[in-house]
Every structure is written in C-alpha cells, then in structure tokens.
Amino acid sequence: MSASRPPSTINLSVARLRAGGHAPRIAVLLGSGWGPFAARVQDAVTLTYAELPAFPAPAVGGHAGRVLLGRIGPHEVAVLAGRAHAYETGAPDGMTGAIRTLAALGVQVLVQTNAAGSLDPAMPAGTPMLVSDHLNLPQRSPLAGPAGPAGDDRFVSMVDAYCPRLRAQARALAARAEVPLAEGVYAWVLGPQFETPAEIRMLRALGAQAVGMSTVPETILARHAGLRVLALSLVTNMAAGLSDEALSHAHTLSAAAAAGARAADLLQAIVAGLEV
Ligand code: HPA
C-alpha cells in the first residue's frame, strides 16, 4: 500500500462500491474505443470517480470517470470507464488507489483495454489484439517510491504478467465468436506526442507488435495487488511511418469509434465466458 495514499480512501471507496450490493470478481478497464461495452452491463449501478476518493480526479477538460457495477453473462463485474494516463501528470501512479480498491473489493481478474498503433502490416486499423507481454519503454513504475508497510513486496515478478490461462480462454472465446484475434507484445510509451518513424523502427526491432500510452502501469499495480490480468488492444492506426495516414488524437478517437461496436461484442463474449 502506498505511503502517500492513506488506506482510508481505499476503505471508503470499497464501502461505497459495496453499497451497490454487487460483489464483482472481474473488473474491466475501458480504454479509447471500448466505451460501447459499458452499455452491455446488465442491471448497472453507476458511481462517478468523484464519489470514490481513491479514484483519480478527471483530467483538465476531461470527462469524469465512472464505475458501473452489474453483470456480464454469469459474472458480476465492475466496469471502469476512464483512466488516469501518465502523460497527464508525468507520474505513472494515477490509478494506484483505483486498482487497490478493486483488489480490496475482492476482484481477482482485471481485463484491460486500450487503443494502440500497429507495428505489423498484418494488423490494420480495426484489429483487436490480445496482449501477450509488454515493453515498459519509459521504465517508470507506479510502485517506485518509499517502501510501504512491512511485508509489502514490491519486487513483483512480471513473468506471465498477462495470465496464460486467461489468454487461452480469450483465444478460444474469440474463435467461438468467429472474431479474428491477433496476439502480440504491447510497447508502452509515455506520450502524449506520437512516435517518430525511427522510434517505430526501434520498437519493431525490439519485438513489439503494438504501441500505446496506457495499460502497463495498471498491469504492474494489478500484479502487485495479486490480480490476474488480461489485456486487449484495439488497433486504431498503423504506427508512424508505416502508412501515409496523419496521426492525431482525433483520428485515434474516430477510428476507435468506427470499430467500437464490434470491439464491444468481442469483449462481451470474452468477459461472459471467462472462468475465474
Ligand atoms: N502510438 C501511441 N499510442 C497510440 C497510437 C500510436 O500510434 N494509436 C493509438 N494510441
């Protein structure tokens, strides 16, 4: 537990989420393009991040985040719409309180989603990609800083950070839904600027298939908290230098919106079918 974030904010957040009457074992963190999934949650009770003191405040000019508690298929879920990005403050620990609240609530699996640029010509815009592993390019960690209480082990193994068993289930569920699902390594960059073509050549040489500005800090936090992680990227563009397309945040959002309904179908099939 971070020394800078008193446990009471987490306890208070847990209490407010529990008051919804749900006991989620799966949490889904929605990134750009995956927003339509929120409408798939049945019997949803919604809280804003502003009601949850351990959750991040909205970025300047951004929308308030919200948590939906409800059901997807047989599972009780907590769906988080909105995440703090490291590029907003320079600090990678904006989701620390939120992830620790989920763990304290009894969540065992974190399903992450994001928008990403593709480094692989076989993965054009609109392709969903299962994250097999990641590259923490900025080499920043939300666990860095003063030690927590005695017994808190921050030296977390990142082998199998993306649970092999959950990945096998996701592959099988996508196949059953007849949705082609790519798989590859996600390279985290700090952003907010896009990459140079030289950086993209470097990332390809390092073995990445996708690049994006999120997800990795939350995976580290979730593994530290004992959660298993599954992550899905939605390709919104070919990365810099790989096509003539001009990159912009507006383009990311419009490409994500174009693929959003199909992405939500896939995510629904995967979450409903997971064996937790
Ligand atoms: N680079 C980094 N982050 C991204 C991209 C990209 O090309 N597309 C969507 N998120």
Image: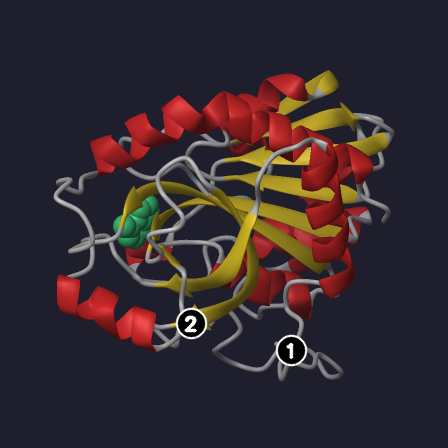
Classify residue 18 by image quadrant: top right
Tell me if mark 2 has few (under 14), some (14-19) or many (20+) residues whose alpha carbon lies within 10 angstroms of its own.
Answer: some
Of the pair 107 and 245, the residue shown nearer to us: 245
Check mark 2 vs ligand 1: CB closer than 8 Å? yes or no.
no
The kind of secondary structure element at disc 1 is loop
Residue at 39% in and 36% down: 58
The image shows residue 43, relative to residue 154, as above or below, that is above
Question: What's the colour scheme?
Answer: secondary structure
Quadrant for the N terminus, please: bottom right
Q: What residue type is disc 2 on?
A: Asn
Residue 136, numbered circle = 2
Do labels 2 and 1 touch, CB within 8 Å? no
Of the pair 61 and 112, the residue shown nearer to us: 112
Q: What residue type is disc 1 on?
A: Val
The image shows residue 177, relative to residue 43, as above or below, that is below
Find residue 26 and report its horizontal and vertical position in percent: 76, 43
Mark 1, residue position = 159
Residue 215, numbered circle = none
Of the pair 258 and 212, the residue shown nearer to us: 258
Find residue 136 and report its horizontal and vertical position in percent: 42, 72
Q: Is residue 151 visible?
A: yes
Find residue 27 and report its horizontal and vertical position in percent: 69, 42
Find residue 129 and report its horizontal and vertical position in percent: 51, 49
The kind of secondary structure element at disc 2 is strand
Residue at 36% in and 56% down: 120
Residue at 36% in and 42% down: 124
The image shows residue 166, relative to residue 189, as above or below, that is above
- Which tag, 2 or 1, sits closer to the chain's start? 2
The image shows residue 73, relative to residue 163, as above or below, that is above
Residue at 76% in and 38% down: 15
Q: Is residue 275 left or right of residue 51?
A: right
- Structural distance between the alpha carbons of marks 2 and 1: 13 Å
